[in-house]
Image (spheres, helix red, strand yellow):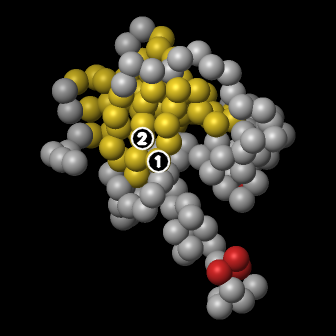
Amino acid sequence: MHADVPADLGLGTSCVHQGGGPPILPTGYNSNFLIVQSHDAVAIEKEVGSEYRVIPLDGTSHAGADIRQWHGDGRGHWEGDTLVVETTNFRPENVYRNANPKTLKITERFKRVDKETIEYSFTVDDPSTWTKPWTAVVPLSSVAGP
């Protein structure tokens, strides 16, 4: 590895990927996200860099297993008042917690609990890495903006 060779730099250092999810987790810096909804998609943009996800809500199936995006291939649907996003097809260079990109599935749930708060939960399921799926819950609070 050579610091003067861009291909050897980490994804964050080279501004290719800086943790835009999934999952969405708080960090010490640039933890804000913009969530925009239309009738057939949801877009989630991280505060810094050019990281965003566009999640179709129109019932289209996941892309083929040979198509792997930086943030995986997310597909969303509504369960009552909760937006559910299932993401698969992660790139090997960007896998959450060293999971297997071929078997990892992250399911996110976004539920507005009041005017200022979304209850955000995510379930990580990768039978080749963990013995069972596990879930975490993080409140997302709104801020004035964008």
Residue drawn at the location 34% of the way across and 34% of the way down: 36
Task: Please identify the residue farthest to the left as the structure is shown.
Answer: 144
Compared across the picture, whether 22 is left or right of 49 comes to right
Q: SS of the residue at dot 1?
A: strand
Residue type highlighted by circle 1:
Tyr
Compared across the picture, whether 7 is left or right of 143 comes to right
Residue drawn at the location 76% of the way across and 45% of the way down: 101
In the rendering, at what x and y percent does residue 46 appear? Answer: 40, 52
The alpha-carbon separation of the residues under discs 1 and 2 comes to: 5 Å
In the rendering, at what x and y percent does residue 90 appear? Answer: 70, 45
Cβ atoms under marks 1 and 2 closer than 8 Å:
yes
Residue type highlighted by circle 2:
Ile
Of 140 and 1, which appears nearest the observer? 1
In the image, residue 32 sits, relative to residue 105, either above or below, namely below
For label 1, count other residues whose C-alpha is less than 10 Å away and answer few (under 14), some (14-19) or many (20+): some
Which residue is tagged 2?
Answer: 44
Where's the N terminus, which quadrant? bottom right
> Which of the 4 quarters of the picture holds residue 34?
top left
Disc number for residue 52: 1
In the image, residue 58 sits, relative to residue 140, either above or below, namely above
Residue drawn at the location 42% of the way across and 8% of the way down: 80
Compared across the picture, whether 126 is left or right of 79 comes to right
Q: Earlier in the sequence, mark 1 or mark 2?
A: 2
